Image (spheres, grey):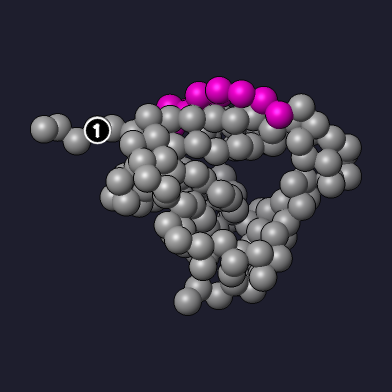
Amino acid sequence: MPDAAHLAAIHAASFTNPRPWTAAEIAGLLDMPGSFLAEVPGGFVLGRVVLDEAELLTIAVAPDARRRGIGARLLAAFETQAQARGAAYGFLEVAADNLAATALYAGAGWQVCGRRKGYYRDGPGGPVDALLMQRTFAQPMA
């Protein structure tokens, strides 16, 4: 079993809005059917697959590990694991003011498909919109 406290520490260093997840919340997500985790030193991605849809639940890179391609590697690991579990489509949400993350996702072919106004409310800067993004994964050739 992954060390949920270690993952929560990375998450806490990575996020203020939305608020970071606790070790108990991360452990609960890891226990859910279809959930999966990819880790590298300084970061992790947590996702889940239900039928043919994958949801990127969170991707976190510690501040001292950023700008080294870790986020891109974690996103690629999410996509690979999701497809291996039968996902044809991916979905995620991201804070609209998280410019580094939105650029990462857009650069990997994710497209904005919706917006939740004022969705993130617990950060120091007040409410922030959530962008909903989606991507169709490569389909295997018949």
Depth check, front residue: 32 or 60 = 32
Residue at 47% of width from left, 76% of height from top?
1
- Mark 1, secondary structure of its residue: loop
Q: Is residue 112 magenta?
A: yes
Horizontal side of 1 relative to 141 (left or right) equals right
Task: Tell me if residue 38 can be seen.
Answer: no
Q: What is the crowding at mark 1: few (fewer than 14 residues within 10 Å), some, or many (at least 20)?
A: few
Q: Quadrant of residue 112?
A: top right
Q: Is residue 54 magenta?
A: no
Q: Amino acid at mark 1?
A: Gln
Residue at 84% of width from left, 45% of height from top?
123
Q: Which residue is mark 1?
A: 139
Q: Which x, y percent locates residue 64?
A: 64, 56
Residue at 48% of width from left, 30% of height from top?
134
Task: Tell me if residue 102 can be seen.
Answer: yes
Q: Which x, y percent locates residue 4?
A: 59, 71
Q: Which x, y percent locates residue 27?
A: 59, 69
Q: Quadrant of residue 141?
A: top left
Residue at 76% of width from left, 52% of height from top?
19
Horizontal side of 116 relative to 77 (left or right) equals right
- Residue 124's place in the image compared with 137, above or below, is below
In the image, which residues are magenta?
106-116
